[in-house]
Image (cartoon, rainbow, N blue to C red):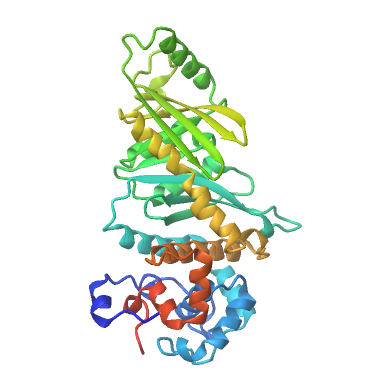
Amino acid sequence: MAPLSQSTRRQQPDLSIPRFFARLKDPRRAHRRLHQLQEIIVVALCAVIAGAQDWQQIVTFGRNRLGWLRSFLELANGIPSHDTFERVFDRLKPQAFQACFQDWVQAVSAALRIKHIAIDGKTLRGSGSAKLGPLHLVSAWASAQHLSLGQIAVDARSNEITAIPALLELLELNGALVTIDAMGCQKAIAQKIVAKGGHYALTVKDNQEHLLEDIQDAFLKAFDTDFAGVDHDEYETRERGHGREEYRSYTVLHSTQGIRHADAWAGLTTLGLCYSERTVKGGTTTECRFFIGDRRASAKYYARGLRHHWGIENNLHWQLEVNFAEDDNRVQKRNAAENLALLRRLTLSLLKAHPSKDSIAKKRFAAALDPSFLEEILGGDGILEER
């Protein structure tokens, strides 16, 4: 595939990865720095885009593409060893690495109107050791833009409830609907979302005292009276394909009557019910899910948000497992595992942003074969400026 034309490249904003990572502090002693920090990061990024899964493969890519890499990197001492890559990524503070990533995300997002953000956790199963369990990361995903917005590692002695507020602190939420599963159905999390200008749709199970019971009672009363005097809205969807049929019915009540301690939930206005039927090979299963929201919006609005929430599973977590073999990655040093995971998410965002309709796997293969296509993934002159 031909490289981007000079005129096309000049029209793009400056999203240079080296520019955004320029302020990252090198954790090594000055006399031990045979390779520049930015060069290590850029080589690793290029290699991961082209299919590298670990430090050894990153080195293999670098040595095989040394001539091309030297067209925009100095690499005075060649390609670092795999031990150097691992040591540098383990010494980098994940918070600092994340901050640089956030700067890039905000620059990319500036021209986008992000309307929905899904938050969910994923465990890196291969990262466990005899001393520590596997690393668990909570990620934020812009569903329409297919853009990874950030990640936070869950402390080994804690859970997602403490990690989610820290992740929300990193995000620009103004006007966006944030969806989280039942683990994130917490008063403090709802308050954080509203305080940052966002809206929430939180799945409700039995982890909040009385809340599920009160919502169920509210819907039973509404159904019994055929919604007489109840401000409500309904929306239905039917889908058929791949040997299955799915029916979903969404109902929202714009009332918090009967909800104990309703005022403890920031801005709470809406109670929701999603009833679904799924038929596969003649067998039908049903499910009822309940949720709460702060925006007095239509059932269709909430339906879209809840439906798109699962995009984080299909378009982020599934891609990381299948195309990046994240669960098989054996990097066990905590900082290195977390930083490499962030690099994979940055890579996935870049791959998804490329207009080609090819799969992620095909794009990575093409990037490994053709440096000009890899340049397109990286954004042309915005990132690769000849020395």
Instruction: Give the quadrant of residue 196.
Output: top left
Which residue is rendered at x = 46% and y = 77% of the image? Answer: 42
238 relative to 40, above or below: above
Looking at the rendered image, the quarter that the N terminus falls into is: bottom left
Task: Please indicate whether residue 268 sits to the left or right of residue 167 in the image.
Answer: left
Q: Where is residue 145 in the image (x, y as percent from the top left)?
A: 37, 54
Q: Residue furthest right?
A: 130
241 sits left or right of 282 in the view: left
Left or right: 297, with 38 as reference point? left
Q: Residue at x 53, y 84 (%)?
A: 33
The image quarter in which residue 195 lies: top left
How many marks overall?
0
Judged left or right of residue 148, residue 113 is left
Relative to 165, is 6 above or below?
below
- Residue 207: % across, % down: 57, 28
Of residues 325 and 17, which is closer to you in this image? 325
Depth check: give the residue in front, 130 or 376: 376
**Residue at image x 55%, y 47%?**
121
The furthest residue to the top: 225
Q: Quadrant of the C terminus?
A: bottom left
Rendered position, 94 above or below 87: above
Query: Does the image show residue 250?
Result: yes
Q: Where is residue 335 in the image (x, y as percent from the top left)?
A: 58, 63
The image shows residue 32 at horizontal and vertical percentages of: 56, 84
135 or 297: which is nearer to us?
Answer: 297
Relative to 71, is 287 above or below?
above
Q: Can residue 192 be seen in this view?
A: no
